[in-house]
Image (cartoon, rainbow, N blue to C red):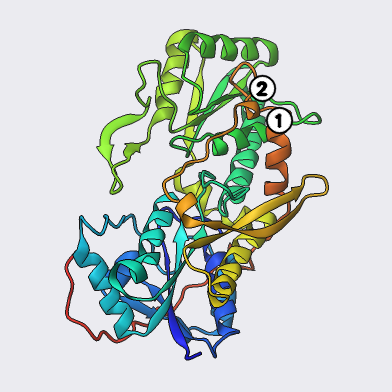
Amino acid sequence: MASKNAFYAQSGGVTAVINASAAGVLETARQHSDKIANVYAGRNGIIGALTEDLIDTNAESAAAIAGLRYTPSGGFGSCRYKLKSLEQNRREYERLIEVFKAHNIGYFFYNGGGDSADTCLKVSQLADTLGYPIQAIHVPKTVDNDLPITDCCPGFGSVAKYIAVSTREASFDVASMAKTSTKVFVLEVMGRHAGWIAAAGGLASSPDCEIPIVILFPEITFNKAKFLAKVDHYVKQYGYCSVVVSEGVKGEDGNFLADQGLRDAFGHAQLGGVAPVVANIIKEGLSLKFHWGVADYLQRAARHIASKTDVEQAYAMGKAAVEYALAGHNSVMPTIVRESNKPYKWSVGMAKLSEVANVEKMMPANYISEDGFGISQACRDYLLPLIEGEDYPPYKDGLPDYVRLKSVAVAKKLAEFKL
């Protein structure tokens, strides 16, 4: 079989371990250089393909590619850009084929979440719709942990670990100040529709380290009276309380508490600022002194405290993507299959992209406590293995020694294309 080149790109919000998936793709491809001559990375996601802005990964040293495993963010740049349907925007698909033909690209690896799975599915159909053969494999990634079929999503375990650790540490702080100062700390975390990240805050409390934590899930409609009663109860019992609130919490009117009326590139509500809203409710309802914080980019960029499980799974997904492509698969996504909790065992599986794209996995009802403000034992059993283990990056002068790629551009062969 004549060798082809591959295209790899990162999409959507980046994570602490998405570059580990990139390392998995690139190192595995290099082991099969007789079939994959080069991997061209799209600068800033699918936009790099459309604008023929490609990065020559062969120009990167083996040490730099290996260093991606320890480096947060998107090493090649990411984007929030969703391809419309072929009927709506045929010119974009024809442009992709032009670029693929010009650079002898026969493999397409797209590393992202739900919207990226949809893009990858559309690209995988190019052979049928426009007569260009290409094998498109989706590499799963999302801190929201909301992709279906796969047991968990690379990126989530490290965010969960960061939130669990941060909630525990902040709670120790509040407990020490509660007698004469702050009584409540509110931490806002990511999660538009699914409360997986918020649930991780519940891990901060354990039988040997009991902490009063109230969790506000997107799956549970916010009830102000019940919430205030819960916070009041904890403060009276423990002297303090921590609140972990998902950005996607909705009120009884069905609107996001944090909806500012703005929309992102995918048309989703641009959320932010739910922590001060909740903190103000506590102030007005209970007259308690509070502090609030927003984990924001910190939670998904914290490679220094990444979960070892998460790093290993992220790398495995990139490796499997290449192996599946070389085995002739198209329009699929490697998945993580949980085989047992204790001891925790997992393996790599496969899902059809048609069953993944545009499907959102919510928290199961039995993962949320009966009062709606905490996690169940079943949820704890699910989450704990995902945050286990440390995989510290190398340090230099007291700081993580992260990799910055040379990102050498591939010479363009086509006319300019305007998005």
Q: Which badge, 1 or 2, is on the more N-terminal residue?
A: 1
* Residue at 64% from the left image edge and 30% from the top image edge: 367
Is residue 393 positioned above or below 406 on the image? Answer: above
Is 180 displayed left or right of 192 in the figure?
A: right
Q: Residue 350 carries which label?
A: none
* Residue at 51% from the left image edge and 22% from the top image edge: 220
Whether pointer 1 and pointer 2 mark residues with C-beta atoms closer than 8 Å, the reply is: yes
Residue 140 location in percent, x, y?
52, 57
Is residue 104 positioned above or below 393 on the image? Answer: below
Q: What residue type is labelled 2?
A: Pro
Answer with the quarter of the image where residue 236 lies: top right
Residue 38 location in percent, x, y?
46, 85
Is residue 191 positioned above or below 302 on the image? Answer: above
Instruction: Identify the residue under disc 1.
Output: 205
Is 410 displayed left or right of 69 in the figure?
A: left
* Residue at 71% from the left image edge and 32% from the top image edge: 378
| Nearest to the observer: residue 17 or residue 91 | 91
Is 296 displayed left or right of 314 in the figure?
A: left
Q: In which quarter of the image is the C terminus?
A: bottom left
Residue 44 visible somewhere in the drawing: no
Element type at marker 2? Answer: loop
Q: What residue type is labelled 1?
A: Ser
Instruction: Identify the residue under disc 2.
Output: 212
Is 89 displayed left or right of 21 in the figure?
A: left
Is residue 324 positioned above or below 295 on the image? Answer: below
Neighbour tally class for label 1: few under 14, some 14-19, many 20 plus, Cα within 10 Å: some
* Residue at 47% from the left image edge and 41% from the top image edge: 360
Residue 268 location in percent, x, y?
32, 40
Element type at marker 1? Answer: loop
Residue 121 location in percent, x, y?
40, 59
| Whole-number angstrom distance, CA of label 1 to CA of label 2 | 7 Å
